[in-house]
Amino acid sequence: MSKNPSRREVLAGATSLTGLALTPALPMKEDPWFRISLAQWSLHRTLRAGKLDNLDFAKATRERFGLAACEYVNAFFKDKACDFDYLSDMKTRAADHGVESLLIMVDGEGQLGNPDAAARKRAVHNHYRWVVAASFLGCHSIRVNAGGNGARDEVQRLAADSLNKIAEFGEQYDCSVIVENHGGASSDGAWLAGVMKLADNPRVGTLPDFGNFHVGGGNWYDRYKGVEELMPYAKAVSAKSHAFDADGNETKTDYQRMMRIVQQANYRGWVGIEWEGGDPGEDEGIKLTRDLLVRCGGRAG
C-alpha cells in the first residue's frame, strides 16, 4: 500500500506539473528541518561584565534558553587553549547539561591572508592550538577570519593556502576550518566563495552570517546574495539579529527569505543565534531570535 505523499513531495509535484519556478514554503513547526544553537557572542556584554562565567555558558544555553548546542568565542577563554584541565571542565559541564559543543570562533590570532610570509606563518600556527582545543571539546570546526592587507586577488590566494594548512593539521583531529563573512573583503560573498574554490578542500568551508556584509567605506554587500553565494560551502550558519518589531520579526533581515535560501541549499545542520542588538537586552533578544527561528522551521532543545 502506498504511503500518503509528504508536504514536500506535494510541493515538488506541483512545481513539475505547472512548470513554474514555485518557491517552496518553509516547513511547519511540527516538521523541523534544522536545529537551533547559541553563539556565545550573543551574551558578550553579560560575559564581559562578569555576570556570567565562560564555564557556565553551556548551562545558560540549556537552562535560560532551552537550547542543546553552543558555539564558543575564544576571547572568553583566550589563555586557556592549552589548559586541558580548564577545557575538561568546560567539556564536563556541557555534557552534564546535555549541550553539544559545535565550534570555537577564533579571533585575534593573525591575518591568514597576510602578504608577509613570516606573519602569515605565525597566524597559521596560532590557529593550531585552537584546532586541538576544539577537537578536545567535541567541536566539528574552528571559525577563522580570512583577512590581509594587500591586493584582493593576492589575499584571496594566500588565505586559501593558509586555510588548507590549517585543514591539513585539523585532519588528524577530525576538525574543520570555516570562514565567516566578517568585514572587508570577506564580506564580499563572491570574493569569499572564490577563496573556497581556490582552497578546494572538504575540510574548508564557510559560516554565512546574515548581517556581516559591510565591505568598508560605508558600503554593504547584498546580504541575501551573499548568503546564497556562501551556502554551497556552509558547515554552520549564523542567524544574526539586531532588533525586532512588535510582531517578533527581525527588522534588518527577512528571516523567511533568508532561511529559504539556507533551506534550498540543502543545508540541514545547526543554525546559531547571534544576537547583537542593544534593546531589548541580551536574554530577551536571544529568545526573540530563537522563537523566530522556530517559526521558520527550526527546533529548539
Image: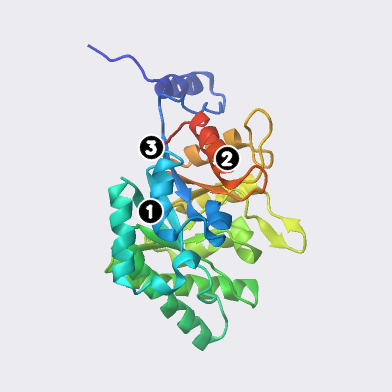
Q: Residue at x 46, y 71 (%)?
A: 78
Q: Nearer the viewer, residue 286 or 250?
A: 286
- Residue 177 at x, y percent in the picture: 41, 64
Which amino acid type corresponds to the residue marked 1 in the rendered image? Leu
For disc 1, the marked residue is 102
Which is closer to the viewer, label 2 or label 3? 2
Regarding residue 269, the answer to whether it shows in the image is no
Q: Residue at x 67, y 42 (%)?
A: 243
Q: Which mark is residue 301?
A: 3
Classed neighbour count for the residue bearing mark 1: other residues with Cα under 10 Å, few (<14), some (14–19), many (≥20) = many
- Residue 283 at x, y percent in the picture: 55, 43
Q: Secondary structure at mark 3?
A: loop
- Residue 239 at x, y percent in the picture: 54, 45
Which amino acid type corresponds to the residue marked 3 in the rendered image? Gly
Which of disc 2 and disc 1 is earlier in sequence? 1
Quarter location, residue 259:
top right
